[in-house]
Image: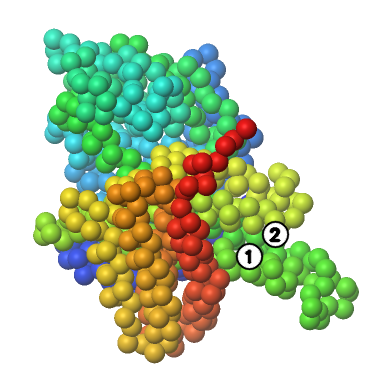
Amino acid sequence: MPNYTAPLDDMLFLFEKLRDNKNYNELEKYNEVNSDLVKDILGEAAKISENLILPLALSGDENPAQLENGVVRTPPGYKEAYSKYIEDGWISLSCDPKYGGQGMPKTVSAFFDEMLSSASLSFKLYSELTIGAYNCLLRHAPEEMKDKYLPKMVEGKWSGTMCLTEPVCGTDLGMLKTKAVEQKDGTFKISGQKIFITSGDHDLTENIIHLVIARASDSPPGTKGISLFLVPKYIVNDDGSIGPRNGVSTGSVEHKMGIKGSATCVLNFDEAVGYMIGPKNKGLNQMFTMMNLERIVVGIQGLGISEIAYQNSLSYAKERKQGKTNNSKSTNGADFIIEHADIRKSLLNMKSIIEGERALCFWLSQQTEVSLYHSDENIKQEASDYVSLMTPVVKSLFTDLAMEITSDAMQIHGGYGFTKDQGIEQLYRDNRITPIYEGTNSVQAADLVFRKLINKNGDIITKFLKMIKSECESKNENVKTFSKEINYYIDILSKFTDWIKEKHTNDKDDVSAAANDYLKTLGFVSLAYSWIKVLEVSYKEHETNKKFYDDKINTAKFFFQKILPRAEFHYKSAISGSSNIMNFKFN
């Protein structure tokens, strides 16, 4: 089983030194969330992640969730751990105090999301979808519905799901077949089948609150006719007690490559009682509240798995002897593999990406809070646009790079990495779902280039690049070298953007073929921007903690020398166009 220690020093560094967003600091609701409080919270979060949840990773992999006589049973140890987890209030961390939550910002809860993803993604998924459903209901449900369902969800006694995908539709939700027939009492009878439903059924909670998209009988075809419904596993009585079983049953639990402890279900809705959330035919917009936040969290899953893969690779490299280096000082014929240049390069590759991602995620968490709670509508909208722009980048880039990092981790471990003994191959398998679910990474890239660069509020990407360029104009002589470097890649990204905009009008196949390359170019430049912010602090504060800040500076140097140049490669590859791709004749 892999070992894991939560990277508290790095997390606290970000919270204390990079909480520099003026608009975020104007949010009065978080005035009391200071460094001492966050240090205490993250310290306790680390303990529960390392001691309670980490051992569940192996248990879930060896004893997957199973459907037995109509009941979905979670792996050994899950029930006991979940009881302790909700008893300590961890689900409520970022929830509204009105419904029993602790009201912590995403600048704090995102760190806990990362820890849980490192410790056991399968276990995390049982509560993660609950928070997603909570966020959707919080923003779109009527007060009576929120009062009835949210307190129990925040407490963790009831869980939540997101039910979109069907056998006939995945990405193209306009093709859905699930029907909703209105009843005289205002409820609806929901009938249809949903597949690949994460935490769709299990034995951890008293009730499961399904959020289901369906088409009312009088609604138009396509996405314009989609409504969103709350469909509980058990009917909830007016007094809040649990009533009879609803018409929801589990058809099967998928047998998967990874995240085996998580129950991925086929759910059958047979005239199940459902309650419409918000206006009719506006369900897709409502569901996207949940989906967009979930996509950022999926990116954090990739970050968390990358972190534990790196930690174990570093540890193994320090204790495994193999071969002699070019400048070997060994007296017994072998050196620790960490002395080999290629191994060191792989480790620094992991480290520089992970720390850049964590810093970018922290920046995005601040923007998210501003987009939700700032009093100035213009500031709120600008932050919302930045979040919209970066959501597909964080989801796709972090998870794709996690595949690279977990693969490199297996390589560093050699033959042991390919066996189950070290647990490294499980990290690779568990992460493999992250580029697929919540919208595949190719769909995210298409969403970015066709919908996110420019919207009704204007040219978002140009505004974003101007903001980066402005913030990277450093007065520190040491940082200026890095600023000059990032400006070179910002210019490349600007040219790439102009090319994308031009191709929008005359060759959309070129845009489609370039979408993934564009997303990665934007992603690597965004990571470089995060590193500039880290460098500003590192040079300024250097004398206060030389070892820590030297580590940051040298890791940043590696990123700028070895990782950032990938951005130019993706640009050059993309602008070759799509004619050969589209004209190629497959036999």
Tell me how many marks there are: 2
Callout 1 secondary element: helix
In the picture provided, is 160 more to the left or to the right than 355?
left
Which one is in front, 379 or 442?
Answer: 442
Q: Amino acid at mark 1?
A: Ser
**Which image quarter is the C terminus in?**
top right
Residue 250 screen position, x and y as percent: 45, 18
Residue drawn 54% across and 17% down? 68
Image quadrant of residue 321?
A: bottom right
Residue tagged 2:
412
Q: Earlier in the sequence, mark 2 or mark 1?
A: 1
Which one is in front, 69 or 355?
Answer: 355
Looking at the image, do the residues carrying marks 2 and 1 touch, with CB atoms under 8 Å apart?
Answer: yes
Q: Is residue 228 above or below residue 575?
A: above
Residue tagged 1:
346
Callout 2 secondary element: helix
